[in-house]
Structure formats: C-alpha cells, structure tokens
Image (cartoon, rainbow, N blue to C red):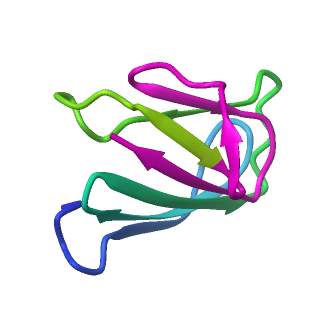
C-alpha cells in the first residue's frame, strides 16, 4: 500500500488517548509522514516503521534533525508533527 503513488492516509482514528490522523507517502528510500489530531498519550508517541526489512538511518521531525529513534521506531511528544524518515 505504501508503494501507491498517492500513499495512504487515515482520518480520525480513535485511540485510548484521543483521535489521530496521518498521511504517509514513500519517495525512494524516504517516507514522509504527517500526523495530527487530539491524542495526548502520557508517555508520548511511537511511530512504528512500516518496513520489516529496512532499518531507519536518519529522521527529521518538523524539518530538524532528530535523534530519538531506533532501527524500527521514532519517538516524539506532540502533535501535529511532520516526519521524514530515511532508510
């Protein structure tokens, strides 16, 4: 589904901590994600990589270099957020 030209989006998905929406699009070895909504989990957010066989190499959050990530997850605290994830 991420290989589709238009990417994928989800709107107003209910969670325990409030609604969340996102749009995700792949561009070569990069995935761009916009996440927004009213969700406020007490320990912040975890974005799970959509790829099982690729490791995250670099992340930008709101166009700034970001260090709070692992090979498979990106951690952040607030919405809205724009992620640029390089593999």
- Which quadrant is the N terminus positioned in? bottom left
| Span colored in magenta | 61-87
Query: Is 52 left or right of 42, judged from the image as shown?
Result: left
Residue at point 29% right, 80% down?
Answer: 6
Q: Position of residue 46 (x, y in %)?
A: 58, 30
Foreground residue among 54 and 58:
58
Query: Is 25 left or right of 61, judged from the image as shown?
Result: left
Residue at point 56% right, 25% down?
Answer: 69
Foreground residue among 85 and 3:
85
Q: Position of residue 48 (x, y in %)?
A: 43, 33
Task: Write down the quadrant of residue 9 in the picture.
Answer: bottom left
Query: Is 8 left or right of 23, judged from the image as shown?
Result: left
**Is 19 part of what is drawn in magenta?**
no
Number of disc labels: 0
Q: Spot the residue most to the bottom.
A: 6
Residue at point 39% right, 31% down?
Answer: 56
The correct choice, above or below, for 24 with respect to 44 in the image is: below
Q: Position of residue 33 (x, y in %)?
A: 51, 58
The correct choice, above or below, for 21 with respect to 64 in the image is: below
Residue at point 31% right, 41% down?
Answer: 50
- Which quadrant is the C terminus positioned in? top left
**Is 82 part of what is drawn in magenta?**
yes
The correct choice, above or below, for 86 with respect to 80 in the image is: above
């Amino acid at each position: 589904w991420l290989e589709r030209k238009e990417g994928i989006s989800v709107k107003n998905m209910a969670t325990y901590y409030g609604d969340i929406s996102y749009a995700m699009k792949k561009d070569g070895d990069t995935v761009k994600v916009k996440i927004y909504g009213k969700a406020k989990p007490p320990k912040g957010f975890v974005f799970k990589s959509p790829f099982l066989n690729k490791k995250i190499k670099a992340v930008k959050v709101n166009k700034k270099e970001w260090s709070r990530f692992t090979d498979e997850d990106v951690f952040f605290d607030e919405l809205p957020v724009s992620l640029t994830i390089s593999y």
